[in-house]
Amino acid sequence: MHNELLDTTYDEQFDTIESLRWRPWVGRGYRTAPRRLLIVGDSCYAQDKKGNPSPETEADFLQDKDTTRGVLNCNMEKKDTWRVYIGLCNMLVGGNEIEDRKKLWEQVAYYYLIQNRVMQTVNDEPNEQDYRHAWPCFLEVVKVLQPTDCLVLGVRNETAFGVSMEQAGLKWTIEDYPEPVGGNTKPRYATITWPDGHTLNLWFMKHPTYCSPEAWRKFFREKMPEAMKLF
């Protein structure tokens, strides 16, 4: 897939990860950015315009390693109305024009946490087995991308996080932030520490489809200020 904002130099390493169905999007500025921000989406959904399951779309998604990249290509077109990406761009960049979207995707890496299946509709949610597949895959992706910061979309996505880290032999912590942001949802803050002492911090936020962009932008400017300077 050709896109002037896409860095494909990680693809050879991505293709060695057996549990990774879809190659992550990596913006061309990610590798050399002062902070490398990995954004972890929820799931890939296959439904028609009326919200009904679409077997044809599901089959296409399952066969295409660049599904994630195709979705984000669409996000950089005027016709795209996916609320998750509109909310994410409004939250991080402070706008949702085409140039705002390009500014976002040029600087970050992005992939779907759930890699073992496609969700049928927005009412279909990952189960614990999906997450037990997802988090070991996440660790392999992190090994390749070496992010300095990680933003996980959806607080429910911490399911099986701890047990997966323990099975990998890693130290970990996770806790609710004491105060809600922009409503009733409390962010979750997690850390993963490797044997060599390297630590990755993760923030689990309210799904961008439903969040207050201004409130969460203010929160992350305080909690990960260097990463937010990318935008």
Image (tube, rainbow, N blue to C red):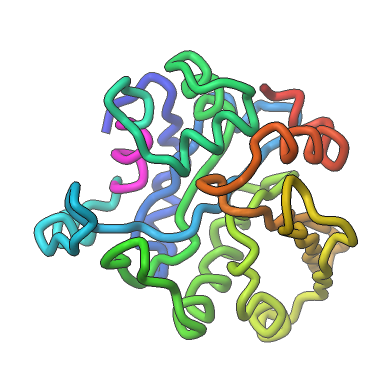
Compared across the picture, whether 31 is left or right of 85 comes to right
Q: Is residue 36 left or right of residue 82?
A: right
In the image, residue 131 above or below residue 192:
below
Judged from this view, the residue extending furthest toward the left is 56
Residue at 83% x, 69% y: name it.
Answer: 175
Q: Can you give x and y, in whole percent of width and height, for residue 154 in the image?
A: 59, 59
Give the residue displayed 77% in from the left and 59% down from the top.
Answer: 186
The front one of 159 and 136 is: 159
Q: Image point 82% across, 58% down: which residue?
A: 199
Residue span colored magenta: 67-74
Q: Is residue 73 magenta?
A: yes
- Can you say which quadrant of the picture contains the N terminus? top left
| Residue 137, x across and y down, in percent | 51, 68
Furthest toward the front, the residue is 183
At 65% across and 70% down in the image, what residue appears? Answer: 158
Q: Is residue 179 above or below residue 139?
A: above
Q: Quadrant of residue 141?
A: bottom right
Quadrant hosting residue 98: top left
Is 51 displayed left or right of 10 in the figure? left
